[in-house]
Amino acid sequence: MNQRTLREATQPARLEQERASDLLERYPDVTGEEAGAILNFLQTGDYFDVGLLTSNARLKPKLDAFLKDHRDHFDAEPGRAEAVIGLAVLFLFVAWAVWAVLN
């Protein structure tokens, strides 16, 4: 992959990050569609780009307000934590049973 191809491949992600940054700067004065664009970027954007956006100290107050207002989009589904804990307990029990049989 040459330098030009690399630059072209990263261009859409950079534009998406810049748009999300611009929208967060205007938050809460954004439309529902624009809030959806911010949500989409935070949930599906490249980890590096989302990390850069969330580490921006200038945007932190706006981002905190946005996350507070849209908390329901980021919370775990009901029962998911219980399922993970149950699976962990089951795994530990099976590991203990195998260890007990082998010793």
Image (tube, rainbow, N blue to C red):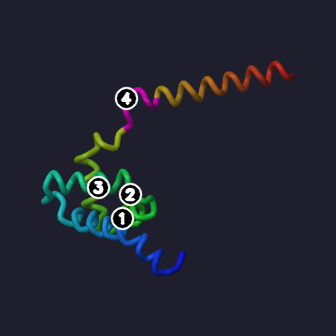
Question: Do the residues bearing badges 4 and 3 touch, measured as CB atoms within 8 Å?
Answer: no
Looking at the image, is 21 positioned above or below residue 33?
below
* Disc with the residue nearer the chain's start (1 vs 4): 1
Which image quarter holds the C terminus?
top right
Q: Which mark is residue 45?
A: 2
State yes or no: discs 1 and 2 in contact (Cβ < 8 Å): yes
Amino acid marked by disc 1:
Leu
Q: Quadrant of the N terminus?
A: bottom right
Query: Magenta stretch containing residue 3, yes or no?
Result: no
Answer with left or right where residue 55 lies relative to residue 69.
right
User: According to the image, label 3 marks what residue?
Assistant: 64
Could you tell me which residue is drawn at 28 percent across and 52 percent down? 39
Query: Which sits earlier in the primary sequence, circle 2 or circle 3?
Result: 2
**Residue located 74% across and 20% down the image:** 97
Q: Residue at x 73, y 24 (%)?
A: 96
**Which numbered circle lies on residue 78?**
4
Disc number lying in front (1 or 2) = 2
Instruction: Point out the tag, 4 or 3, that comes first from the N-terminus.
Output: 3
